[in-house]
Image: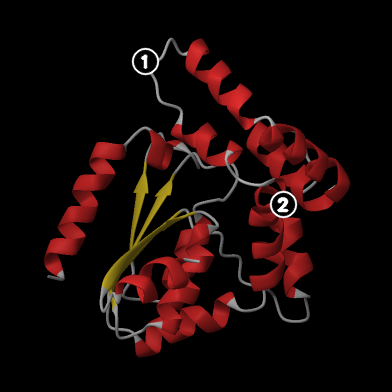
Amino acid sequence: MIERSVIKRHGVKSFHIVAHSLGSILALALAVKYPAAVRSLTLVAPPYFPVPRGEVGTQYVLRTVAPRRVWPPIAFGASVACWYEHLSRTVSIVLCKHHRLWELAFRVFTLYRVRTYLMDGFFCHTHIASWHTLHNIICGSAGKIDKCLEIVRDQLTCDVTIYHGRDDELLPVQCSYAVKAKIPRARVKVVDGKDHVTIVVRRQKELAMELEEIWNRKR
């Protein structure tokens, strides 16, 4: 969709890529497909787990990203979405079918002072997309991330920057260091006191300034 609705539609010849969490996998695939066009690549909390020799990539990554546990809540949600397909699809149908009701409730609850982009973005998905976003990206890409990282390392010359919250309970900081091990020129910035969501949501201005610095270096 990014390729069809943005790159090809508008004839984009060069661009910067910024991606968070599972979006990092899509970002790597996009960078590999357009190596000459990428000016910089910024990954925030990338879900990269090197697969040990002899392990099946999909199963290993699923067990690592979404172990069957109930705490913290973000890990519980990942576990249900990945391992209990029918239950997670049912929840997605209920949430997404009635997204206008949930959006109104959140706006009223926050007294219209806080625009809940995070919730709006989720509820506006179709129920299929909201489930596949987590499940199929992991399943479909677990065995391909290593190859993408190697291509970025060997064939791309763009800057690679990685941000990760030190308190991330879903994806540990080791994920970002594992990416750096694959791409030695990558710069890793670990932010204290931030988790998987607040690495972006509660530091928008700081992140925007940091991105501007990255982009200005590659004008």
Horizontal and vertical percent position of residue 145: 57, 75
Whether the residues at callouts 2 and 1 have beta carbons within 8 Å, the answer is: no
Residue nearest the viewer, comparing 106 with 10: 10
Residue nearest the viewer, comparing 112 with 48: 112
Q: Dot 1 corresponds to which residue? A: 113
Q: Earlier in the sequence, mark 2 or mark 1?
A: 1
Query: What crowding class fits label 2: few (fewer than 14 Cα within 10 Å), some (14-19), or many (20 or more)?
Result: few
Q: Dot 2 corresponds to which residue? A: 128
Q: Is residue 16 above or below residue 68?
A: below
Q: In the image, which disc is placed on residue 63?
A: none
In the current view of this chain or complex, which residue is farthest to the bottom?
A: 155
Horizontal and vertical percent position of residue 131: 71, 50
Q: CA distance from mark 2 to mark 1?
A: 31 Å
Q: Amino acid at mark 1?
A: Arg
Query: What crowding class fits label 1: few (fewer than 14 Cα within 10 Å), some (14-19), or many (20 or more)?
Result: few
- Give left or right: position of 76 versus 208: right
* Identity of the residue drawn at 62% across and 22% down: 101
Under circle 1, the secondary element is loop
Q: Is residue 19 above or below residue 86?
A: below
Q: Is residue 49 above or below residue 44?
A: below
Q: Amino acid at mark 2?
A: Ile
Q: Indicate the quadrant where residue 19 lies.
A: bottom left
Q: Is residue 98 visible?
A: yes
Q: Give the position of the C terminus as an image quadrant.
A: bottom left
